[in-house]
Image (cartoon, rainbow, N blue to C red):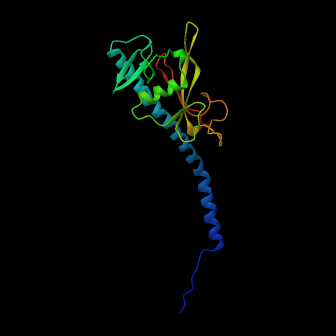
Amino acid sequence: MMKKQQGFSLIELIIVVVILSLLAVTALPRFLNVTEQAEDAAVEGVAGGFAAAVGLVRAQWEIEGRPSGTSASITMDSTQIQVNEFGFPTSSASGTNLAPESMSASACKAVFDGVMQSPVRSVVSGTDATDVRYYIGVQSGGTTDSGVDYLLCSYHLVATLKLNSSTGLPTGTVDFSVGNSFSYNPATGQIQVYSNNT
């Protein structure tokens, strides 16, 4: 004997689709918010590690008797790190030390790579940022002392920037009002996090 098989009726199917649609509409904003929170946490985590490393460099500078001069440096875990007159890192390359008003994107990258135990992949401004996590540059706006404009190192999370598909460069001006980033002030050692999620 053949058994009669039954499936869902059209009305039951429509009701299930409507319920799933309502659930999707209410859950989607929560999932988008989780992405923004993850981006915020990523920048805050790296900035926190960077701040701790800068503090350790400053402490080592104190321990080594505050070396000064244009080639002042300290050694941390067999890595030579150039420090400025205030004891904050300005480069990991040996040679002439940089004053806070003379920082460059390359020097900011050298600080990032030199003080972090396991630095994430990064590039300096003007370079294809497609396959890296941080885009590094310099911006004015640091502590001014006697009219001197100290430069800030800027570290932008690439996932929060819009990149040109052909060049891999960020579109528009990259400053602290764009994407998620943190700054490092080599004159004071201060780290500040910027979150621009909307």
**Coordinates of residue 64 in the picture (x, y in percent):** 32, 15
Indicate whether 7 appears above or below 72. Answer: below
**Coordinates of residue 29 in the picture (x, y in percent):** 59, 47
**Coordinates of residue 82 in the picture (x, y in percent):** 42, 19
Indicate whether 19 appears above or below 93. Answer: below
Indicate whether 94 appears above or below 122. Answer: above
* 40, 153: nearer the viewer: 153
> Image check: 129 left or right of 96?
right
Indicate whether 79 appears above or below 67. Answer: below
Q: Farthest residue in the right direction?
A: 172
Residue 66: name its quadrant: top left
* 166, 51: nearer the viewer: 166
Counting every numbered tag in the picture gives 0
Q: Farthest residue in the top direction?
A: 146
Q: Farthest residue in the front direction?
A: 95
Quadrant of the snapshot with the C terminus: top right
Name the residue at 61% across, 27% down.
175
Residue 54: name its quadrant: top left
Name the residue at 54% across, 16% down.
102
Name the residue at 65% across, 40% down.
164
**Coordinates of residue 116 in the picture (x, y in percent):** 42, 30
